[in-house]
Image (tube, grey):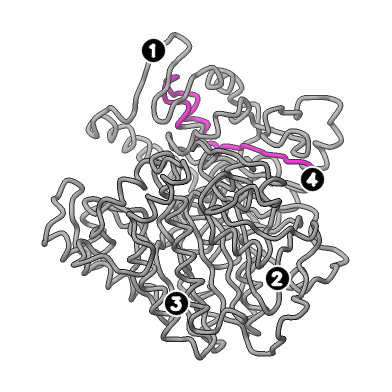
Amino acid sequence: MKHLQLNRRDFLKGACAGAFATIAPFRGLARLTLGGQAARTNKRPNIILFITDDQDKSSIGAYGAKALTPNLDRMASEGVIFHQAYVNSTVCTPSRYSFLTGRYAGRSYSRRYEEECPREKQGFPSFNVELEEDNMNVGAVLQKSGYVTGYVGKFHVGPDIKRPREYEKFDLRYISNDAPPDYTGTAAFRHNERWYREFLKKKGFSWAKHIYWGNLQKPFNHHNPEWTIEAALEFIEENKDRPFYLHYCTTLLHGPDKSWRVSMDHRRVSGEGMLNELPKVMTDRRVLLKRLEDNGLDPAQGHAGYSWADDSIGAILKKLDELGIAENTLFVFTSDHGSNMKGSLYNIDGTNVPCIMRWPSRIRAGSECDELIQNVDFAPTFFDLAGAKVPKEYVVDGRSLRPLLKGNEPEQWRDHLYFEIGSGRAVCTKDWKYIAVRYPKERIDQIKKARPDSLPKLMAYIGRSGIGTRGAQNPSFFDSDQLYNVKQDAKERNNLAGNPEYRERLAKMRGMLKEDLESFHRPFGEFVPGGNAAPPGLIDEQIELVKKIKINGKKVILPSDRVFDEQAQPDRQRKPTERQMRRDNKRKQRRTR
């Protein structure tokens, strides 16, 4: 994504006049403080968690961007803006799992994850985790504690349902990607969406509506935030007189920048097929586009999506004000991960995400926070604030943010964060980052035998081209060990792991990671030996070769200038290779039993 940047200091001084809402000067990088004049109440708060998809901080006015985001800017001026908020993983499923549970995805004990990654083997947290059968998640726990819990929007933490036989298994209706967007497709999508609602209720949520199972699906693959906001406002209205928790996940800003503007022209397309008419719950799309034009912002360059998502927030803020419940509602805005560095473990546009909270009766307006927080912290925070009865067997990795929200000075907050994705693990302090890439033995065998054009995909942390290799913009993406001084090198371009001057710092960061990894009781590289874990140094030749390959999406250009484009190959040419890889994995698993 390309963003026009605005100096944050100028923004806070009011350079963004007019449509770019000016926010009051923040009061320093202190901990969040209790609202001085706000009414105090012992009533349990309503809680709204609003999660966008693939959103970078550089698309929000409150973070210094030249973007039309007046509602997020308002939230920042009336609440707190976090500068050191992170997610544990940079693809949808593992990140969303952690939002829902407060656990790292690598600690999942769902059947699917344990079948793919038996406990005696190295974990591979990616698109293979699900909510567990015991319903140890935020929706179920809060419901049992007296809250009405609602889910709206994108899910992406359920069983893998893509092929006809998988649809049939769950009594769902399969529609092929090349089917027309007609009545038959609408009937199928509507039937499936009702099933998705019931699935979420079985997982512990008391209310669910207008659900996307995962990413947008053809033939109805256009964003429609009005459709999901309609359900969110209905839930809030119905439950205004009792404590509620709303888990809202928009499909924006997933997909290419231009797709958001294109979606605006498909007003009736939704997650349940074709609507009779567009819900009138947000600013008219034509009016929103006119505002962008008046402010010199190109909708096709991402701004349609930025402002559309922001307008969704405005609809919720308006409803809270109308119902008179805003004062005691904690409204949390964040994203599942960044976009430009999706599939990596780098901070900017990857693990470091926007996060703004508003709670008028508790958080002082215009606050800023520079403490390390992570998406695993949200569930325990909500449990704490709700006075929830959390089962003793509930496994949680995060911690409650209550000390920060109350303005207390915790004696010890945390000194680092842990990250994971596929074959990569990392730890990060405010000043330093260490990344370890350790492939399991079976992947190393594949890498050694692979053609050069296959290396980027095989060596991507999640084993995918495209989103899996976005991090290759960084020259050290494929290095086994990476050490960065993120205070001085925010973009993480200068790998210091091989520099003797930083030997002690490297050892200290490796020690942090080792301690974190040991808590998972799974092998990983040389840190926790055993199973299929392997030490570094076995594929150094391939690492040097893959670093010389130019990568552009799913297209690779070898040093010889020969071009390979996976996306241009027909499925019948790609699938045998994928099938062969699966067969090879199964054979190796049988041999190790």
Going from N to C along the chain, the mark reached first, 3 or 4, is 3
Residue 413 at what x, y percent from top left?
Answer: 81, 62
Compare residues 429 and 35 and report the one nearer the observer: 35
Q: Amino acid at mark 4?
A: Gly
Going from N to C along the chain, the mark reached first, 1 or 4, is 4
| 428 is within the stretch colored magenta | no
Residue density around tag 3, few if under 14, some if 14–19, many if 20 or more, within 10 Å: many
Q: Nearer the viewer, mark 1 or mark 2?
A: 2
Q: Amino acid at mark 2?
A: Ser
Instruction: State the CA–CA distance, disc 2 to disc 3.
Output: 21 Å
Compared with 495, 508 (above or below) is below
Residue 58 at what x, y percent from top left?
Answer: 58, 44
Q: Secondary structure at mark 4?
A: helix
Q: On residue 178, which mark appears?
A: none
Q: On residue 400, which mark appears?
A: 2
Whether residue 266 sits left or right of residue 516 in the image: it is left
Residue at 45% of width from left, 72% of height from top?
A: 133
Q: Name the residue beneath numbered marker 1.
A: 562
Which residue lies most toward the left here?
A: 183
Compared with 217, 464 (above or below) is above
Residue at 47% of width from left, 50% of height from top?
A: 306
Q: Nearer the viewer, mark 3 or mark 1?
A: 3
Compared with 56, 40 (above or below) is below
Q: Nearer the viewer, mark 1 or mark 4?
A: 1
The magenta region covers 431-457
